[in-house]
């Protein structure tokens, strides 16, 4: 049996929550390995709808759920999310949930800095969620972060606070803001520390024990490959590596443990916030995709930009992340379109490209080259086998496979867990 790593192969919002939930019911442990509470997953289980931002999707099924060291953790957001899920009947305790004790914390000063920067950037704003994720990762790399393990040693925090505040006070002064209130920050940390520490442990050790016992581990990524800080549409990216290779470094398990890489791919393309988007449709068709797909961010509530499927971008994501197979989601949103289009390449100043260039100016200037296909009049919603799909929908899936040079492993046909066509079982190597 194989482990499985799940990543988004576009700009996020591909429907990872439903797929991870479906896989988590068959896994023994689920691990979040990067990102923060800027990632949103919506799970639909029967009549119940769960909205997650930080917790691994496996928590809803009672599967051992772990937040790895590659995540940046807002302890107050964590507590609020756990309390909300508890009211929905989800049981969360130290037996089924763990946090890496070397996980960096998102602090109020990170949220402050995030907001101040976005306000000052004007037209150059990145379009962050304003939740402090970027500044927290900066402090991690700058070796001034406060981590989960520090919550057990708050009386010895002065030296770290000196380094942290020296950095942030200078930045805050530049924005005309007062220095960090150290006493208030320490008081807030002392208040939240007992709650977080009940879940804290060296999760690398627990995961290695699970792996050696032959259990199935599901690694859950946040955002999408096109938001990767190295490989995404820089600078309109997130602040962490979202590619599959991060599953190893962000969890404490070696790269030989990450197994089958499942790329989640929406049957069309969406994006939240600023940045290039070659196939964006700012017309009635784009509006139709957004309305039918309920394209509003789980975390931000912001309306998503919508466009046709971009095979060039997805092929690039699959190559960079070593995707073994894809899970194609939201196919039903295309039901009823007379014609559907797929981007197969770009034109840039008279030259044809089969990849997305790295420079922002080139990314903004590329023009999509489309291949048009007949749509289908039947419905794909709720289909659980190939026989349930219209013939033209099957042709569309087959063409997507060819263009992205990666096979389809799953097809999701509604938000419901069981409305899934299994082509290849990711847990069977």
Image (tube, rainbow, N blue to C red):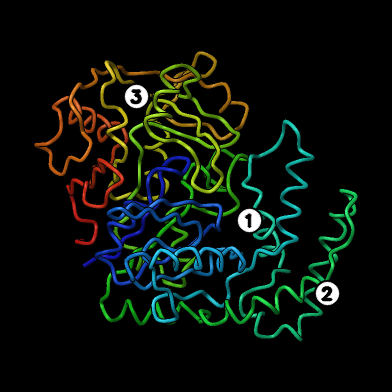
Q: Residues within 10 Å of mark 1 (few under 14, many from 20)?
A: many
Element type at mark 1: helix
Residue 179 lies, in percent from the top left, at: 88, 62
- Residue 353 is tagged as none
Contact, CB < 8 Å: mark 3 with mark 2? no
Element type at mark 3: strand
Q: Looking at the rendering, which quadrant does residue 414 occupy?
A: top left
Give whichever of discs 1 and 3 has the lower sequence position: 1
Pick whichever, 232 or 164, lies toward us.
164
Measured in 3D between alpha carbons, the distance from the residue under mark 1 to the one under mark 2, in whole angstroms, is 23 Å
Residue 122 lies, in percent from the top left, at: 76, 33
Q: Nearer the viewer, mark 1 or mark 3?
A: 1
Q: Does 175 appear above or below 347?
A: below
Left or right: residue 179 versus residue 277 is right
Residue 100 lies, in percent from the top left, at: 52, 75
Q: Residue at x 83, y 67 (%)?
A: 165
Q: Looking at the rendering, which quadrant does residue 181 occupy?
A: bottom right
Measured in 3D between alpha carbons, the distance from the residue under mark 1 to the one under mark 3, in whole angstroms, is 34 Å
């Amino acid at each position: 049996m194989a482990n499985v790593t799940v990543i988004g192969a576009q700009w996020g919002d591909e429907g990872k929550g439903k797929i991870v939930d479906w896989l988590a019911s068959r896994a023994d442990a689920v691990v979040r390995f990067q990102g923060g509470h800027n990632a949103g997953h919506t799970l639909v289980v029967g009549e119940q709808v769960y909205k997650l931002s930080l917790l691994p999707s496996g928590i809803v099924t009672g599967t051992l759920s772990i937040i790895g060291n590659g995540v940046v953790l807002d302890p107050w957001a964590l507590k609020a999310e756990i309390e909300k899920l508890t009211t929905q009947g989800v049981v969360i305790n130290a037996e089924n949930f763990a946090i890496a004790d070397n996980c960096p914390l998102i602090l109020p000063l990170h949220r402050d800095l995030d907001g101040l920067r976005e306000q000052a950037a004007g037209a150059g704003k990145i379009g962050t969620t304003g939740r402090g994720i970027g500044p927290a990762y900066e402090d991690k790399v700058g070796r001034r972060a406060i981590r989960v393990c520090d919550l057990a040693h708050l009386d010895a925090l002065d030296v770290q606070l000196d380094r942290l505040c020296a950095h942030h006070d200078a930045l805050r002064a530049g924005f005309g803001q007062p220095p960090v209130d150290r006493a208030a920050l320490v008081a807030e940390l002392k208040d939240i520390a007992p709650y977080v520490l009940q879940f804290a442990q060296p999760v690398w050790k627990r995961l290695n024990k699970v792996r050696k016992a032959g259990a199935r581990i599901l690694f859950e990524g946040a955002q999408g490959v096109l938001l990767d800080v190295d490989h995404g549409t820089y600078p309109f990216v997130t602040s962490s590596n979202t590619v599959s290779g991060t599953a190893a470094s962000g969890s404490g398990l070696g790269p030989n443990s990450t197994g089958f890489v499942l790329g989640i791919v929406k049957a069309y393309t969406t994006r939240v916030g600023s940045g290039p988007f070659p196939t964006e449709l700012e017309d009635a068709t784009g509006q139709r995709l957004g309305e039918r797909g309920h394209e509003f961010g789980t975390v931000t509530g912001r309306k998503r930009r919508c466009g046709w499927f971009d095979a060039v971008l997805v092929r690039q994501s699959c190559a960079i992340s070593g995707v073994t197979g894809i899970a194609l989601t939201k196919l039903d949103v295309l039901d009823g379109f007379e014609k559907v289009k797929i981007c197969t390449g770009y034109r840039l100043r008279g030259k044809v490209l089969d990849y997305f260039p790295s420079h922002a100016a080139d990314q903004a200037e590329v023009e999509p080259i489309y291949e048009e296909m007949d749509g289908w009049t039947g419905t794909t919603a709720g289909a659980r086998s190939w026989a349930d799909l219209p013939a033209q929908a099957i042709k569309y899936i087959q063409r997507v496979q060819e263009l992205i040079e990666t096979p389809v492993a799953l097809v999701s046909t509604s938000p419901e867990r069981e409305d899934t066509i299994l082509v290849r079982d990711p847990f069977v190597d």
